[in-house]
Image (spheres, rainbow, N blue to C red):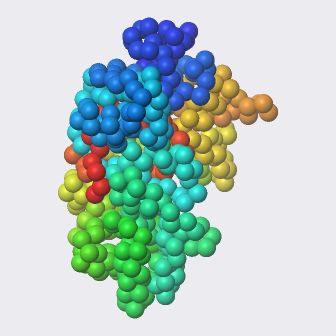
Amino acid sequence: MEIHVVQPGDTLFQLARQYQVPMDRLIQDNQLPDPSQLVVGQTILIQRPEVTHTVRAGDSLYSIAQTHHTTVTQLLRNNPALQGRDLVFPGQVIVVSYWDRPQGELTVNAYAYPSISRDLLRATLPYLSQLTPFTYRFTGEGQLIPPEDTGLASAALQSRVAPILHLSNLDEEESFSPELAHALLSSQEAQGRLIASLLDTAAQEGFLGVDVDFESIYSQDSQEYAQFLGRLRQALGSRQLPLMAALAPKTSAEQPGRQYEGHDYHLIAQNVDFALLMTYDWGWAGGPPMAVAPLPQVRQVVEYALTEFSPQALYLGIPNYGYNWTLPFREGSRAVSLDNVEAVRLAWNRHARIRYDGSAQSPWYRYVDDSGAEHEVWFEDCRSIQAKLELAQEYRLRGVGYWNLDRPFPQNWVLLNGTTNIRDGM
């Protein structure tokens, strides 16, 4: 697999000739909405099929998989144009394998809101080990509040993906509430009630693990939070269900700030099976323009986490989004969030050249809007994702966790499949 960065004058026809790959393969693998609209600085993934199968009458993905000693899931991964569907027609060419072999193995987790497009979900599930629907909530008395739609768990199970129950301290205003967490952590009775409900819900809905995501909790609650995780882990262990905790991206034990102080890595490591490092949002809606997940900062978080956790207990968080800031940045202003496909489309519409920050390992560009205001956009592309996957492999981490699936990023999944052996389940 190669990553081509579009240069001035490049066309898809020229790239197909240069790399000796059919143009329709480039279009399918990169899911290009308009192949004529290439942006200077845009990335194009190049894959070379090794073994292909031309569909005959009566073939199905299952029969093709049996013939070539592979799996339906792997065929879906190798053929993104199928969009997760087992629908083939005579004469269609199915890629069975590519010349490049994936290196290393990762467990791939991803979060999704109940409102996610079912077409997008179906197209993405083959690339996942786990799916974590966002989110179950709770009251201060320990009553569990389910999301409006819990059908994602069954969709995951049907695709042989492990569904993970996500529990957060979000309140009715969609904010992470330290007060709500404090009320729960101050009451053994409320914790017992919540733990019992979590066990019942996991059994009823088919969840195969629990992910606790308490954010912005009070520093004085850090010990009680770790103890709650320990009680929950013990209860889940009786059902052979693992426990994960989502952690603020700390680089030291005494890092100041509400986001960090309630997460004691040392205590939490003793009370969970796995941890997700939320290594993103350095560039955020309320801050100045910068990469969402600059690699040097991500590396610092990983290196600190490894002083408390084993590598096989850690998941690296990967963002599936970017931001568009209006310049000059002013305190109190808010950037607009956008998806990575949309960021490339916006660059085309604004005749912007995409640049790449070699230190942050992230693409960015500037443009001027119709009113004359300048904008700066930071997002993710194949190069920035590859850098994060290589970091996870370098430190032999257990896996990666994407926030979140609700926005399309087709190149990411092609890259992941081409470079990584994706584990099943936990």
- The quarter of the picture where the C terminus appears is bottom left
Residue occupying the point 54% across, 37% down: 340
Q: Residue at x 28, y 69 (%)?
A: 241
What quarter of the picture does the N terminus occupy?
top left
**In the rendered view, would you say 198 is above or below 342?**
below
Q: Residue at x 48, y 47 (%)?
A: 122
Residue depicted at 24% across the width and 71% down the height: 240
Judge whether residue 117 can be spotted in this image: yes
Seen from the viewer's position, the closer of residues 81 and 192 is: 81
| Location of residue 39 by image quarter | top right
Q: How many marks?
A: 0
> Quick check: 2 left or right of 34?
left
Q: Nearer the viewer, residue 411 or 226?
A: 411
Q: Position of residue 163 (x, y in %)?
A: 39, 61
Residue 125, x across and y down, in percent: 42, 48
Query: Where is 48 relative to 235, above or below?
Result: above
Position of 112 relative to 268 (above/below): above
Q: Is residue 415 above or below residue 135?
A: above
Q: Quadrant of residue 193?
A: bottom left
**Which residue, as the protein is rendered here, is positioned at the far front?**
58
**Percent x, y for residue 35?**
57, 20
Q: Is residue 321 visible?
A: no
Residue lying furthest bottom in this view?
189
Q: Position of residue 205 (x, y in %)?
A: 42, 70
